[in-house]
Image (spheres, rainbow, N blue to C red):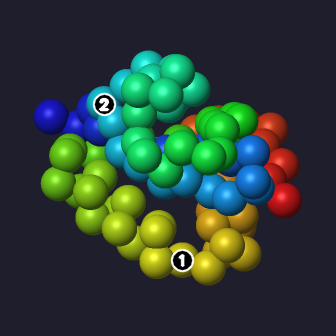
Amino acid sequence: MSNWQVYMILCSDNSLYTGISNNAERRFQQHTSQRGARYFRGREPQHLVYLEGGHDRSSASRREAAIKKLRRSDKVRLIRSEHNKISGIQAR
């Protein structure tokens, strides 16, 4: 099935968290209610800033790993690209 998504969240410390889910909105809510990743201990998720669909779990995991290796400037470029399914995002 191709319903997995790769997403990025802008955090309160201006960092970018990257993850995968088959429901990014639900996963964002889990992160905001502290039922998500340990990464959010000590920082809060602010906004979902990037969403890329059309993956199966395996390809989403590979894409997540590739994005996590990028420099911040490259992540911001990706957020501003046509690959982003969220429109109107202006990450710093």
Q: Is residue 66 above or below residue 41?
A: below
- Find the distance from the CA under tag 1 to the CA under tag 2: 23 Å
Where is residue 17? Give x, y as percent. Answer: 55, 53
Q: Residue at x 19, y 46 (%)?
A: 57
Task: Please name the residue shown 71% across and 64% down the image.
Answer: 76
Numbered badge on residue 13: none
Point 35% across, 68% down: residue: 65
- The amino acid sitting under disc 1 is Leu
Q: Nearer the viewer, residue 89 or 38?
A: 38
Above/below status of 2 relative to 35: below
Residue that badge 2 annotates? 22
Assign the C terminus to one quadrant of the image: bottom right
Residue 38 appears in the rendering: yes
Left or right of 49 on screen, residue 70: left
Residue placed at 58% from the left, 39% from the top? 85
Query: What amino acid does circle 2 point to?
Result: Asn
Q: Which residue is mark 1?
A: 70
Residue 54 shows in the view: no
Quarter of the image holding residue 58?
Answer: bottom left
Quarter that holds the N terminus = top left
- Residue 67 in the image: above or below residue 56: below
Furthest residue to the front?
42
The kind of secondary structure element at disc 1 is loop
Quadrant housing residue 44: top right
Q: Report crowding for label 2: few under 14, some 14 to 19, many 20 or more residues within 10 A (C-alpha).
A: some
Q: Residues within 10 Å of mark 1 (few under 14, many from 20)?
A: few
Query: Where does residue 19 sit, x and y in percent of width and height?
Result: 42, 48
